[in-house]
Image (spheres, rainbow, N blue to C red):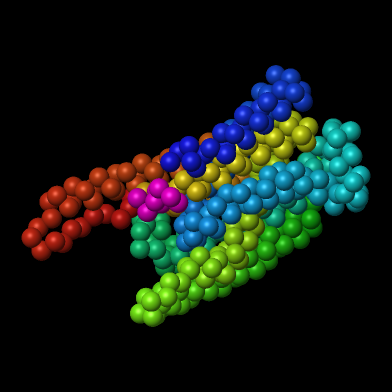
């Protein structure tokens, strides 16, 4: 199972590291290896959230996500995205931006760093909305019950997530953005942060609305598929299930790609703390992205999220932490080690809580009375 799911990741790792040695020797090998670990540590929560969506799709679309999706993730976000940033911020043509990335790496890094306030505001608001919508939803299973129960009650207020996000954006633009550090020195980026943050919020609302629509459409397709299968059985005519599921799953796949892109911002920006060589960056982040993809599929096929029910909670808390960190980095520099560690610790804590819950359930089943009634705590 492990080799089947992670086989391509192992192969890409070997090819990427060999390519790094040929490109820049053993120093390049070390840089690519570090970038790979950085990307995996920063994106583990990405894999958990993606798995929650991907498990609703057919094996066919899971394979598409792992193949075509990885091309979008690696070449789109890890290679093209930094070039697009430079092209827009420096008002250069795409070819000029690529030439700059290859021939004047220091200037290229400066331009990407100077664009960080806009990127951080956009990505921070998008991820913050994911977190807020999660914690304000009333869920049957609660991890931190003492916190999630009152928040679920507050979540009944319409548009509360949007209001809180806008307040956070306003505070950010009035504090961190007024002293954002650029290569030319401190600068007032309040307007840029506001516009980028609003754009991130709008993007989330559009993407979230479309994903909700397509998720409902997918459920309707599954219901029609079930009815069609029953009718086909009665008529003695077999019917393919993949085609029906694929109609709606295609749009869910597009949503997954947009969601995955939002998680990539911190990894791409953080990579510049290690190297400004776009080739090494693409190799290292590409390897890391491949493992995140494989891990997503592994979680789905193993049913890990169903067995360890608090993992999604831990991942969303990690997303909330990442959103706050992105907004803070508009003015202050925060080590990628801290960012990655917070996410890993939150997910590890949620995993341990899931294990304890499973043990409590097993013990309760053993002590169940003859009526079959059991009582187990749903969270902390």
Q: Residue furthest front?
A: 236
* Residue at screen point 33% across, 53% down: 379
Which range is magenta?
300-307
Q: Quadrant of residue 206?
A: bottom right
Percent position of residue 51, x then y: 49, 53
Q: Nearer the viewer, residue 168 or 222?
A: 222
Percent position of residue 74, x then y: 68, 44
Residue 301 part of the magenta segment? yes
Q: Residue furthest left?
A: 370
**Count of residue discs:** 0
* Residue at screen point 29% across, 48% down: 357
Percent position of residue 27, x then y: 71, 20
Please determine whether, in this image, residue 375 is positioned above or below residue 240. Answer: above
Residue 63 as seen in the image, left or right of residue 149: right
Percent position of residue 207, x then y: 63, 65
- Which SS type dominates the magenta stretch? helix
Residue 110 part of the magenta segment? no
């Amino acid at each position: 199972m492990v080799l089947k799911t992670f086989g391509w990741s192992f192969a890409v790792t070997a090819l990427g590291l060999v390519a790094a040695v040929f490109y820049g020797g053993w120093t390049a090998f070390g840089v690519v290896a570090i970038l790979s670990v950085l990307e995996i540590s920063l994106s583990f929560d990405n894999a958990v959230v993606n798995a929650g969506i991907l498990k609703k799709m057919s094996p066919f679309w899971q394979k598409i996500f792992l193949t075509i999706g990885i091309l979008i993730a690696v070449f789109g976000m890890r290679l093209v995205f930094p070039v697009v940033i430079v092209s827009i911020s420096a008002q250069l043509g795409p070819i000029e931006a690529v030439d700059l990335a290859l021939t004047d790496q220091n200037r290229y890094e400066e331009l990407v760093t100077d664009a960080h306030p806009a990127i951080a505001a956009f990505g921070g608001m998008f991820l913050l909305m994911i977190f807020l919508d999660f914690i304000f939803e009333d869920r049957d299973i609660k991890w931190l019950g003492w916190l999630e129960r009152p928040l679920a009650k507050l979540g009944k207020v319409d548009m509360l997530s949007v209001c809180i996000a806008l307040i956070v954006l306003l505070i950010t633009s009035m504090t961190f953005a007024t002293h954002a550090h650029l290569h030319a020195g401190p600068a007032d980026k309040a307007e840029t942060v506001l516009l980028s943050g609003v754009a991130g919020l709008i993007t989330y609302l559009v993407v979230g609305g479309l994903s909700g629509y397509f998720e409902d459409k997918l459920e309707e397709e599954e219901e029609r598929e079930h009815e069609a299968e029953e009718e086909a059985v009665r008529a003695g005519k077999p019917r393919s299930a993949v085609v029906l599921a694929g109609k709606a799953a295609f749009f869910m796949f597009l949503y997954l790609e947009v969601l995955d892109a939002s998680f990539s911002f911190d990894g791409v920006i953080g990579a510049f703390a290690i190297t400004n060589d776009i080739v090494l960056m693409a190799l290292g982040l590409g390897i890391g992205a491949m493992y995140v993809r494989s891990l997503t599929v592994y979680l789905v096929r193993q049913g890990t999220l169903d067995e360890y029910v608090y993992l999604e909670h831990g991942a969303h808390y990690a997303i909330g932490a990442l959103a706050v960190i992105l907004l803070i980095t508009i003015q202050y520099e925060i080590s990628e080690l801290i960012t990655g560690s917070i996410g890993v610790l939150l997910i590890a804590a949620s995993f341990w809580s899931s294990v304890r819950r499973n043990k409590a359930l097993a013990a309760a089943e053993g002590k169940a009375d003859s009526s079959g009634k059991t009582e187990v705590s749903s969270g902390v």
